Each structure stands twice: as structure tokens, then as C-alpha cells.
Image (cartoon, rainbow, N blue to C red):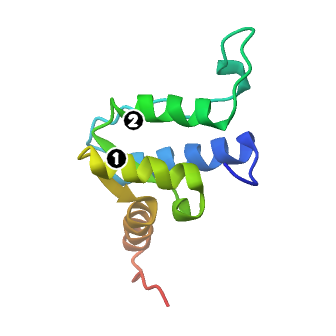
């Protein structure tokens, strides 16, 4: 979340969820709430970045699939989440692969070829 607001991250996450649902319309997808804000901090507690990371990691325990956002490799917390997901045999895929499928579907529906240059 470095250099990004909670709202920016939440918007990106919501777009990702929408696109995933479009790419896999026949799949039953349950989104695990792994984005935490100051409102989630227990009353009277003062916490730092590690608390938020820990909560995200705990939430990841329930996941069958972990989707890594674009540029995850540039954020320390995301790097840690990725390493843990891999080490604990979670299925991990980068979001750009899903986004590419989405763009291919959109192009096909419009009768166009999809090409990245």
C-alpha cells in the first residue's frame, strides 16, 4: 500500500473482482475480505503496518487462489504475501493474466483480434 491511499487500493481491488467475475462467469467465486483499514483496528489499540499485513495473511489462509495485483513485486507487503502463498502451496496467479483473458474476450465479442504490441 506504499504511496497509495486506501481508496485507490479499494477501487483497484473492486475492478479486479469485477474482471475476474467476467472472465470466469460460470465459476463460484467467493471473495475473501483481505483489505483492512483503520476501522478494522480493535478499539483502543495502536497498530502499525505489520498488524495489517498479519490480518491479510490470516485471511489468505482461507483462499484457494491468490491473485496478485499489478506491480505487486514493488510493494514489500505484497512480496511477503506472495512468498507465503507460494511457500504454503496456494495457487497464485498474477492479475495481468486474467486481465489479458478479459481483453481477449472483449475483442472477440466485438469481432476483433486482440494484440499486445
Q: Is residue 22 visible?
A: no
Q: Position of residue 28 (x, y in %)?
A: 28, 35
Q: Is residue 71 visible?
A: yes
Residue under circle 2? 60
In this picture, residue 62 sits left or right of residue 20:
left
In this picture, residue 21 sits left or right of residue 35:
left
Q: Position of residue 72 (x, y in %)?
A: 53, 59
Question: Looking at the image, which residue is at 48% across and 44% down?
Answer: 17
> Which of the 4 image quarters holds residue 40?
top right
Q: Mark number for residue 68?
A: none
Question: Looking at the image, which residue is at 39% across and 53% down?
Answer: 83
- Could you tell which of marks 1 and 2 lies nearer the N-terminus? 2
| 15 vs 79, nearest the viewer | 79
Residue under circle 1? 85
In this picture, residue 18 sits left or right of residue 28:
right
Q: Evaluate if marks 1 and 2 touch, with contact meaning CB atoms under 8 Å apart.
A: yes
Counting other residues with Cα less than 10 Å from the Cα at mark 2, is it few (<14), some (14-19), or many (20 or more)?
some
> Which of the 4 image quarters holds residue 39?
top right
In this picture, residue 24 sits left or right of residue 11:
left
Find numbered disc 2 in the image and state the secondary structure of the residue it sits on. Answer: helix
- Compute the Cα span from label 1 to label 2: 8 Å
Q: Position of residue 38 (x, y in %)?
A: 72, 25
Amino acid at each position: 500500500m506504499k504511496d497509495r491511499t486506501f481508496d485507490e487500493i479499494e477501487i483497484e481491488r473492486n475492478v479486479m473482482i469485477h474482471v475476474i467475475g467476467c472472465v470466469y462467469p460460470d465459476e463460484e467465486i467467493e471473495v475473501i475480505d483481505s483489505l483492512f483499514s483503520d476501522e478494522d483496528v480493535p478499539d483502543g489499540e495502536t497498530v502499525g503496518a505489520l498488524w495489517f499485513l498479519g490480518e491479510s495473511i490470516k485471511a489468505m489462509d482461507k483462499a484457494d487462489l491468490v491473485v496478485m495485483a499489478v506491480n505487486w513485486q514493488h510493494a514489500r507487503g505484497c512480496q511477503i504475501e506472495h512468498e507465503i502463498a507460494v511457500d504454503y502451496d496456494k495457487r497464485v496467479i498474477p492479475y495481468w493474466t486474467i486481465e489479458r483473458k478479459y481483453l481477449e474476450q472483449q475483442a472477440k465479442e466485438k469481432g476483433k483480434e486482440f494484440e499486445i504490441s
